[in-house]
Structures are given as structure tokens and as C-alpha cells.
Image (tube, rainbow, N blue to C red):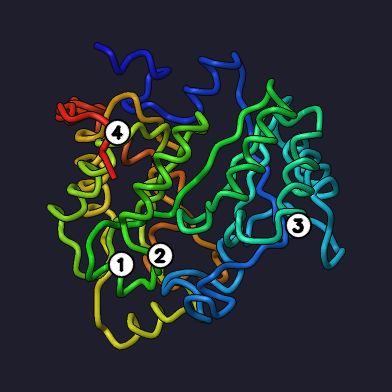
Amino acid sequence: MEHLRWNGKPYYSLDSYFKSVYGEKIYKISLDGGFTCPVRDGRIHDRGCIFCSAGGSGEFSAASLLSAERPSVTEQISAGRDFIRSKYRGRHFVAYLQPYTNTYGPVEQLRRVYTEALSEKDIIGLSIATRPDCLGPEVLRVLKEMQELFPQKFIWIELGLQTIHPASIKYIRRGYDTSVFESAMHSLADLHIPVIVHLILGLPGEDRAMMLSNIEYINTFPVFGIKLQLLHVLKDTDLAADYSERKFDVLTKDEYIDIVIDCLEHLSPETVIHRVTGDGPKNLLIAPAWSSNKKGVLNLLHSEMEARASFQGRLYTPDPTGFRTV
């Protein structure tokens, strides 16, 4: 069967992709580039998306390994590389600009941060987490410049779509219309920049059919990768306030495993799975408590998919219209 090519896993994992392309395990180094976000600086809102921690999802960045208040990208890469090599045999790495919105800043800052990361010899590529409404012409020109300066290295863009459903979009304070995502996909395709899309599973008010429709929507684009993120309730977020008032329930482990399997079965087998769960910082995590055992969740997912003879793309139907038009 086709799924056997994924190093024995029932889905096309990022690890399988790296081993097929580079012949070795590749590690990510999460970096803080010193950016902010339009949902935090007042342009759209001042409290961030409803689920986002004060650290902008950057609690695991290499900056936390250093005592300096604002360590440079080079310093962070060095610290992250040393930390990984103290535990594993990592030879090559991906620089991952993770916290906040990493295309939201002065062009000079973008150019400096990207160049600094890509100049490191052990870095094979740069993955930039951002928003589709922060990919204007000047940003796209910087990305094209990086491609020309570092032709042997890749640049990926990670877009926080999260959901396509209007009520959820408003609730989480995403701050842009889905048409903006579609326009960004076309702009990045023109530059031949692979895109990784983030989706959240378990948003309040979204049932199984709605979550699967997010997957069907993604299938209409030439998406390189996807991150399926379990909804976490973290301390000091507006989502935590709603949870404390019992306005919604989080998914149980069994519910989450079921929906992840459904999503994987409907997803294109060509889409690389960059994440199938998540482990929020233990000092911030309120719920679901079971998600803190990431290894256990992954083991359960793999065993359940094996028991069901399930694999990525089992129920996938190609979209005959191809790349969605704007």
C-alpha cells in the first residue's frame, strides 16, 4: 500500500519527508525574531487571538535557553544547536521563526533576521510563521531576495488559518477574511514558496463536520504541509476566562484521536504532516490535561490507526477544479 512509503507511519510525517529528501533526521530550532503581531499592537486588537499566550506561542524558543534579554538570532541558533546535540545526533537544522507574526515589521528588520538565520552553515532552510494579511508587496520582495541570496536553502511560510467558519473566525479574533488567505496562497505560489497551514481542532461551536470541511477546503490548494493543533486552554488568555465560565468543553483524548484520524483520512496524501497534536507549556496549560503527554497521544494515534487499517488519504477525493481561484 502507498502509505508504507512513510517509514512505517500511516501518514506522511515531516520526519519522513526530511529523511526522503535529505537522508537524515532534521531538527527545528525555534527562534524569536523580535516581532510583534497586529492582534497585539492595536492595529486589529491589543490582546492577541483569544487562544494565544502572552509569549505568542514562543515559550519553547531557543531564546529561553539564554540569559540575555534580547539574544541575537545567531546566539539563539548556537544555543538551540548545542541543546539538541546534547540529546541527539543532529547535523542539520531548520531555523523556525515561531513567536508572533514574523513578517510584521520594518523591511530592514525582516531582511536582517532572515539573512542572519540563513547564513548559518548548519541551517538548511527557514520556516516563517505569519499571517496572510502580513504578506504585502514589500515582504514578498524580501522573500524573493532571500531565495536569490540562498538558492541552496528553502524558505517555507506557515500561515495561521485555524478555521474557515465565520462564527469561529470572529470568536477567536483572527482579524482577516478568508479571501485574504486565498490571495496570499496565490502570491506565495507565484514565488514557489511552500506553505504550511495551521488548523485548530476543537474550537468552541465546531462539530466534526465543520472540522472536516476545513480539511476539504485545504485540499483545494497546493498546500505543502499542515499542522493540526489541538485547542489548548492556556492561563491568562481570554479563552481561559470563557472556559472557567463553562462556555465550552475541550475535546477528550478519544474524541481528539477520532477527529484527527478523520482529518488525515480526508487529507491529500501529498500533504506533509508537520503536527498532529501539540503540547502547551505545562506551566500555562489549563486544559486538556491529557495533552501534556505528547508521546502517549502519538502512540495512541498510531496504534488506533493501525487497528482501523487507516492511513492518510484513504477517503481523499481530488478537487477537479484544481487550485482555488480568488
Label at residue 63: 3
Task: Mark 4 vs mark 3: give the one in front.
Answer: 3
Distance from disc 2 to disc 3, alpha carbons, whole Å, reads: 23 Å
Which image quadrant: the C terminus? Answer: top left
**Mark 3 nearby-residue class (10 Å; few <14, some 14–19, many ≥20):** many
Q: Quarter of the image for the N terminus: give it.
A: top left
Secondary structure state at the residue bearing disc 1: helix
Give the distance between the C-alpha atoms of the residues marked 4 and 1, in whole angstroms. Answer: 33 Å
Query: Element under label 4?
Result: helix
Neighbours of disc 1 within 10 Å: few (<14), some (14-19), many (20+): some
Q: Secondary structure at mark 2?
A: loop
Q: Mark 4 sits on what residue?
A: 303
Q: Is residue 207 above or below residue 217?
A: below
* Disc number placed over residue 169 in the picture, else none: 1
In the image as oriented, which residue stretches furthest toward the front? 137
Q: Residue furthest bottom?
A: 245
Amino acid type of disc 2? His
Q: Position of residue 307 (x, y in %)?
A: 20, 30
Q: Earlier in the sequence, mark 2 or mark 1?
A: 1
The reply, left or right, for residue 231 in relation to residue 268 is right
- Label count reads 4
Q: Earlier in the sequence, mark 3 or mark 1?
A: 3
Q: Nearer the viewer, residue 240 or 288?
A: 240
Find numbered disc 3 in the image and state the secondary structure of the residue it sits on: helix
Q: Are marks 4 and 3 in contact (CB under 8 Å)?
A: no
CA gap between label 4 and label 2 equals 23 Å
Q: Which mark is residue 232?
A: 2
Image quarter of residue 178: bottom left
Of mark 4 and mark 2, the one earlier in the sequence is 2
- The answer to whether residue 308 is above or below residue 143 is above
At label 4, counting other C-alpha atoms closer than 10 Å, the crowd grade (few under 14, some 14-19, many 20 or more) is: few
